[in-house]
């Protein structure tokens, strides 16, 4: 009787914990389909937001490159005080004093200059190359944003199905608990009437205790997996979610179509990176080319023994303007082989990314082949485990009837219960394996975003 009371108290405690687990979330339960989970993640997950910001930032990077081809205009000003003027030694014959030396101080104690200068690149190969690379830079970040979205979709979908599996295991355990509790009631009645042994009652009570322990473990696993899903979605952890049962139907997939690897975001991103490295090499090679630029300036200068600002000729301060226009030509002749070394480094980077392209293509082909194999195997396993679970249920029903009639032992009954639980869990795990493989198959076709449209 003490054991029965203990089991009852434990059951009530676990039920209360289950209610507390649900009560930790505030607000109404949010029902999430896979499409809704993915859409929420693309709008709220930090990875997706940062990728979108990089696309936006690429526009400013392009503007920065374009600015090098536009005129550069700046204003300048200076105010200088010379406490001691520099003297210059000159021949006195120029001043009618041959044979003498004159020390003359040139300049004024104060001078102030204000002006405007302009510089315009006329020919600069690195600027032209940068302008060509600007479009590729934008496309690179757009592809990177697409790849990030696909990664978010993949993580959310994987965790979404894993939450389902944990919830299904909880359903199986609850079903097992109900079945075992009925058996316990039968044995308890038999024991009270002297038709069952005490050891049989103890064994069934131990079985119920073990089920309750397993149920608590699965409850924890459900909570942890749900928290992981919310994290990958960018959803507040305290939000309570529910996943519809209809979202996990096994649907056939097209396995005959071989995907085009060149359309995958991973491959496209590397190709765009290769294109940018080519532009980088051309930009370095531009160091071999001459550059030509136009420069112009207009300035106003004031000089005198007093601070020029606000002073007039009557104060001994005189103002004048001057301007200049010029062409600046720079022809590189010898750079100590520095440019050549940079070009060769760029060549190595291009060879490296070509190896990455080959390796990525091989990895993508492998991913498709493995997903296809897993799909085939999972379908077979699902059918087998479904039949096995149905058969295990029939065995349990027959064994329970035989036990009541005294034709089967308690060991046979417990074994039949364990077999049914194992078969049901195996069936659930087979569905998970299929769904995970289905995601990889869709990914290998470059069609992860179709999960939003379904």
Image: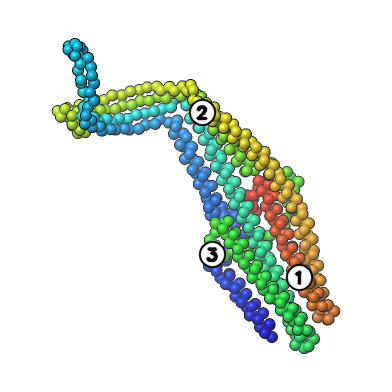
Residue drawn where x is 53% and y is 39% of the image: 138
Residue extending furthest toward the left: 314
In the structure shown, which secondary structural element does the residue marked by tag 1 occupy?
helix
Q: Is residue 76 left or right of residue 186?
A: left
Mark 2 neighbour density, 10 Å: few (under 14) some (14–19) many (20 or more): few
User: Can you say whether 84 is above or below 261 in the image?
Assistant: above
Residue drawn where x is 44% and y is 23% of the image: 330
Whether residue 124 is visible, yes or no, is yes
Tags 2 and 1 in contact by the CB under 8 Å rule? no
Q: CA distance from mark 2 to mark 1?
A: 74 Å
- Mark carried by residue 418: 1
In the structure shown, which secondary structural element does the residue marked by tag 3 occupy?
loop
Q: Position of residue 391 (x, y in %)?
A: 81, 67
Q: Nearer the viewer, residue 158 or 280?
A: 280
The N terminus, quarter of image: bottom right
Residue extending furthest toward the bottom: 193
Whether residue 128 is visible, yes or no, is no
Residue drawn where x is 72% and y is 59% of the image: 431
Residue at the spot of label 3? 238
Sooner in the amino-acid sequence: mark 2 or mark 3: 3
Q: CA distance from mark 2 to mark 3?
A: 59 Å
Figure label count: 3
Mark 3 neighbour density, 10 Å: few (under 14) some (14–19) many (20 or more): few
Q: Is residue 115 left or right of residue 36?
A: left
- Mark carried by residue 338: 2
Q: Position of residue 319 (x, y in %)?
A: 22, 27
Q: Position of residue 279 (x, y in %)?
A: 55, 32
Q: Is residue 219 left or right of residue 394?
A: left
Sooner in the amino-acid sequence: mark 2 or mark 1: 2
The C terminus, quarter of image: bottom right
Q: Position of residue 165 (x, y in %)?
A: 67, 62
């Amino acid at each position: 009787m003490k054991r029965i009371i203990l089991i009852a108290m434990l059951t009530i405690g676990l039920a209360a914990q289950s209610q507390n687990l649900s009560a930790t979330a505030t607000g109404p339960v949010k029902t999430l389909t896979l499409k809704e989970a993915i859409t929420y993640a693309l709008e709220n997950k930090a990875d997706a937001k940062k990728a979108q910001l990089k696309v936006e930032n690429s526009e400013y990077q392009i503007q920065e490159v374009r600015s090098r081809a536009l005129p550069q205009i700046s204003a300048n000003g200076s105010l200088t005080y010379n406490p001691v003027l520099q003297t210059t030694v000159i021949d006195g014959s120029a001043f009618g004093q041959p044979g003498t030396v004159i020390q003359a101080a040139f300049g004024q104690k104060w001078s102030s200059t204000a002006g405007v200068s302009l510089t315009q690149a006329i020919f600069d190969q690195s600027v032209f190359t940068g302008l060509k690379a600007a479009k590729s830079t934008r496309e690179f970040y757009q592809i990177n944003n697409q790849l990030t979205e696909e990664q978010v979709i993949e993580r959310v979908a994987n965790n979404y199905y894993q939450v389902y599996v944990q919830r299904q295991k909880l359903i199986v355990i609850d079903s097992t608990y109900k079945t075992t509790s009925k058996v316990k009631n039968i044995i308890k009645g038999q024991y009270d009437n002297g038709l069952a042994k005490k050891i049989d009652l103890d064994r069934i009570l131990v079985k119920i205790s073990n089920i309750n322990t397993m149920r608590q473990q699965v409850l924890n696993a459900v909570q942890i997996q749900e928290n992981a899903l919310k994290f990958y979605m960018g959803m507040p952890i305290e939000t309570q979610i529910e996943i519809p049962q209809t979202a996990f139907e096994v649907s056939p997939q097209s396995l005959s179509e071989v995907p085009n690897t060149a359309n995958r975001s991973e491959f496209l991103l590397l190709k765009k990176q290769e294109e940018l490295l080519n532009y980088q090499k051309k930009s370095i090679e531009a160091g071999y080319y001459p550059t030509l630029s136009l420069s112009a300036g207009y300035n106003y200068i004031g000089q005198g023994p007093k601070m020029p600002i606000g002073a007039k000729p009557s104060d001994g301060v005189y103002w004048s303007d001057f301007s200049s226009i010029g062409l600046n030509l720079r022809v590189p002749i010898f750079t100590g082989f520095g440019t050549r070394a940079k070009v060769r480094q760029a060549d190595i980077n291009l060879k490296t990314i070509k190896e990455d392209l080959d390796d990525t293509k091989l990895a993508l082909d492998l991913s498709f082949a493995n997903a296809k194999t897993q799909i085939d195997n999972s379908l077979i396993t699902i059918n087998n485990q479904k039949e096995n679970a149905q058969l295990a249920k029939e065995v349990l029903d027959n064994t329970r009837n035989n036990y009541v009639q005294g034709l089967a032992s308690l060991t046979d009954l417990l074994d039949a219960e364990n077999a049914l639980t194992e078969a049901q869990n195996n069936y659930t795990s087979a569905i998970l394996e299929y769904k995970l493989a289905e995601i990889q198959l869709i990914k290998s076709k470059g069609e992860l975003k179709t999960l939003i449209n379904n």
